[in-house]
Amino acid sequence: MTITGEYVPSPSGWVRKQVETIEATGTTDSVHIQNRPVVLLTMRGARSGSIRKVPLMRVEHEGAFAAVASQGGAPQHPQWYHNLKANPEIDLQVGTETFRARARELSGEERERWWAVCVDRFPSYADYQTKTDRLIPVFVLERV
């Protein structure tokens, strides 16, 4: 079942442009973040209930995907973090395929294993962690 409702584009210009490109081409392969492939998360806003979309770095491991709430090492979580916490049922687009997924925030050893995978795929995540006092959250996105 696809998430339905009013879609509200991101106030961030680069996010809005990437989402528009993905929708126009039908594939996440049409955009990149720092020369790396992306996935597209479609979720419900935590406060508004509106449909929100965000492209994130594609980190695939053991048939699931990671969502790293780094925000470049900013002191606060990205807005999409709060959306996933409040509404973990999402639509996930990978290439041309879109499917239902559930987001689950990781902790302990499981988070550490996934964090190592994420840093291996995108070493800047380790740098981002040194820029902030918060522990950067990692979600696993699993097909339902």
Image: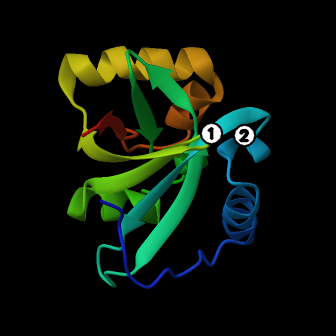
Location of mark 2 (residue)? 29
* Amino acid type of the residue tagged 2 in the rendering: Asp
Residue 105 lies in quadrant: top left
Closer-to-camera residue (36/143): 143
Closer-to-camera residue (123/98): 98
Q: Name the element at disc 2.
A: helix
Picture residue at 28% right of the left edge, 45% below the top: 103
Q: Position of residue 140 (x, y in %)?
A: 33, 34
Picture residue at 72% right of the left edge, 59% below the top: 18
Is the C-beta separation of discs 1 and 2 under 8 Å?
yes
Picture residue at 46% right of the left edge, 39% below the top: 68
Is residue 135 positioned above or below 9 on the image? above
Give left or right: position of 26 versus 84: right
Give left or right: position of 27 versus 56: right
Image quadrant holding the C terminus, namely top left
Rendered image: mark on residue 95: 1
Q: Position of residue 72 (x, y in %)?
A: 60, 46
Picture residue at 34% right of the left edge, 14% below the top: 113
Residue 50 lies in quadrant: bottom left
